[in-house]
Image: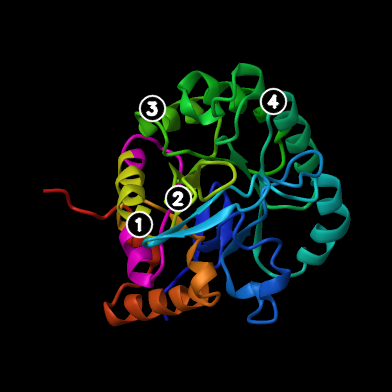
Amino acid sequence: MSNLAVKIAGVTFKNPVITASGTYGFGREYECLYPLSALGGVSLKGMTPAPRMGNPPPRVAETPSGMLNSVGLQNPGVEAFLDNELPYLKDKGTVLIANVAGSTIDEYRSICERLDNSGVHMIELNISCPNVKQGGASFGTSCENAASVVRAVRPMVKHVPLMVKLTPNVTDITAIAQAVEAEGADAVSLINTLLGMRIDIKTRRPILKNNVGGLSGPAIFPVAVRMVWQVASKVKIPVVGMGGITTWQDAVEMMMAGASAIQIGAALFTDPYAPIKIVEGLTKYLDDNGIADINSIVGQVQPW
């Protein structure tokens, strides 16, 4: 059987399939379907220093080949995670990635410091959050702001790798990736959701109470492949690809674009077994094509 194991910033994943933050909770609901050990890793629900109730409903809407969400980082807070969720997760036999968010740099620093030596295997920094001290613009939409967050939290993260999750709502995502790499990011993950909107033509109001939300699902897959390919050619650190991956064929495509591993998100809402089917499909693809090691396909796209 071919090798499915991949290594990202020194952390070994038994296979390259990771469930994306915000789509898998803390894994409890899925364990009645299959063991978490079948996954390469789990990117846990995005956490903030204090509990958040999230945005008012309606906050999820279906769209052609995708979905919009404005959940607003509803989560129990980092202390509840450390007390109630992490002890449960530690013996599940999969890589645990703590996804962290904040509205100020101080919040990012405090939560990273709290999680660094907690037992998680990696920290994923979500820089798509609004910077409340600079008018609400996302931290990740400028090189300066993205770099400032990584520069501030890097000293707080001493025991595990630091991965930065990039927003696609920018002019040049490669410049953002290079900026966070220069400040010490060990890996980058992309793409987060694209900003979108739907309107109810009967009420003439946006379908989401927040007016706009993040678009995910198959509709954004070509954008994600393009951005992963561009970033992978410009940085030396590993890239984890996500955005609309639904099948094992999508996973192969994303890895050929340059992703060392992939994350599955919106696909879980239509098929909770999607990650397992992708692992099985990748195994068969490698065996059928005589490929001994999945790492050999990473970045192997041949541009015209």
In the image, what residue type sits under mark 2?
Answer: Leu
Mark 2 residue crowding within 10 angstroms, few (<14) / some (14–19) / many (20+): many
Q: Nearer the viewer, residue 43 or 235?
A: 43
Q: Earlier in the sequence, mark 3 or mark 2?
A: 3
Q: Position of residue 246 (x, y in %)?
A: 41, 67
CA gap, disc 3 and disc 1: 24 Å
Q: Which residue is mark 2?
A: 215
Mark 4 residue crowding within 10 angstroms, few (<14) / some (14–19) / many (20+): some
CA gap, disc 1 and disc 2: 8 Å
CA gap, disc 3 and disc 2: 23 Å
Q: Which residue is mark 4?
A: 104
Tell me if I can see residue 192 in this picture. Answer: no
Q: Earlier in the sequence, mark 3 or mark 4?
A: 4
In the image, what residue type sits under mark 1?
Answer: Ala
Q: Which residue is mark 3?
A: 175
Q: Residue furthest left?
A: 304
Report helix, strand or loop for mark 2.
Answer: strand
CA gap, disc 1 and disc 4: 31 Å
Do the numbered discs 1 and 2 sit on residues whose CB atoms are within 8 Å? yes
| Residue depicted at x 50% and y 18% | 144
Q: Which residue is mark 1?
A: 219
Assess whether residue 252 is covered by the magenta stretch: yes
Give the number of the mark in front: 1 or 4. 1
| Residue depicted at x 42% and y 51% | 201
